[in-house]
Amino acid sequence: MTLDDAFLEHALQVARDAAAAAAAVIAGYYRDQHLAVEFKSDQSPVTRADLESEQVIRTHLTKAFPDHAIFGEEQGRQGESEFLWLVDPIDGTKSFVRGYPMFSTQIALMVHGELVLGVSSASAFGDLAYARRGGGAFLNGRRVQVSGIERLDQATISTGNLKSLTAGPGWNTLGRLIQACNRIRGYGDFYHYHLLAGGSLDLVIESDLNILDIAALAVIVREAGGVFTDLDGAELDLETRSVLAGVPSLHALALDQLRGWRGA
C-alpha cells in the first residue's frame, strides 16, 4: 500500500468519521451524575464512555483497514502491521468525569514509525483539528499556520504536565524562559496545541504524558509549520514521554536552553 495523497485523504476521512462516532457515544455520558468511575493500576480514571467510544473507533478503523494494527488507551495493542493506529478515546478523562469540557478524542496513524495523519476532536469544547502529511493543518474547517513570532520577549508559552521537569535543573531553566517571555499560560491537554497550530501561542512544554496523548497533535502542529519533538529534541515514538513544540526559532532556542533538563 502506497502513501499517496489519495490514500492519506481517505484514511483521514475514516479517522474523522470514527471521531464523530465516538463523539456521539461520549455525548450520551457527558455530565451524567450517575456514571460509574473506576481506576486503573496507575490510578487514572476510566468509564464506560472511554471503553465504548474506543470500541466504536476500533470498529470504524477495522472495517476500513482490516490489516492495520491498533494501539488504544483502553484495550492496548491488537494486530501487527507497519500501519499502526494510535487511539485515545477520551484524553482528559479526569476533566470528563467532572463535567469540564477540556477533553478530546485523539486518533493518529503511524506508518513505518512515522506519524502521517491526526484528528483531534474536542466535541464538548467545540474544536476539531486535523491534518495529514503534506496536506496542511485545519482547525474548525479553516486552514491554520503557526505564528511568525521569533523573539522570546514577544512569545506566549503554555505548559501542561510538569512533574518530572520540576525534579531537576530543567525547572530553573523553565523559570528563566518564563521570566523572559511575554506571557505564560497553562492551557493543557489538546487546547494549547490547537492554539499553537492556529498562531495564538508560540511554545508548549510538557514533561509527563504518553504518545497516545499527542500523536495526532504532533501531525497537526507540524503541518501548521511548527516543530514538535520531545524535550531532548528527539523524534516521537511509542516511548515518548515529553513534548517541546513551537514555532521553529523558539523551539530551537528552548531546546538549547533545556539541554540536560533531567540532570545527572
Image (spheres, rainbow, N blue to C red):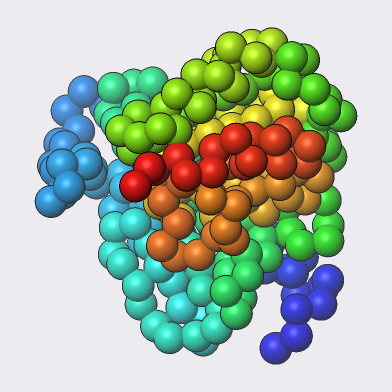
Image location of residue 187, percent across then percent down: 52, 22
Vertical relation: 101 (above or below) 82: above
Instruction: Please report the residue visible at 57 percent of the width from the left and 58 percent of the height from the top.
Output: 234
Seen from the viewer's position, the closer of residues 157 and 254 is 254
Seen from the viewer's position, the closer of residues 139 and 203 is 203
Vertical relation: 127 (above or below) 5: above
Instruction: Please report the residue visible at 55 percent of the width from the left and 19 percent of the height from the top.
Output: 176
Asked if residue 174 lies left or right of residue 246, the reply is left
Seen from the viewer's position, the closer of residues 155 and 223 is 155
Looking at the rendered image, the quarter that the N terminus falls into is bottom right
Image location of residue 52, percent across then percent down: 32, 53
Image location of residue 57, percent across then percent down: 46, 60
Asked if residue 261 lies left or right of residue 130, the reply is left
Q: Is residue 22 visible?
A: no
Q: Extreme front residue here?
A: 264
How many labels, in total? 0
Asked if residue 210 lies left or right of residue 144, the reply is left
Instruction: Please report the residue visible at 51 percent of the width from the left and 27 percent of the height from the top.
Output: 173
Image location of residue 181, percent across then percent down: 66, 15
Give the quarter of the image for residue 8.
Answer: bottom right
Asked if residue 67 lies left or right of residue 136, the reply is left
Instruction: Please report the residue visible at 31 percent of the width from the left and 67 percent of the height from the top.
Output: 76
Q: Is residue 48 visible?
A: yes
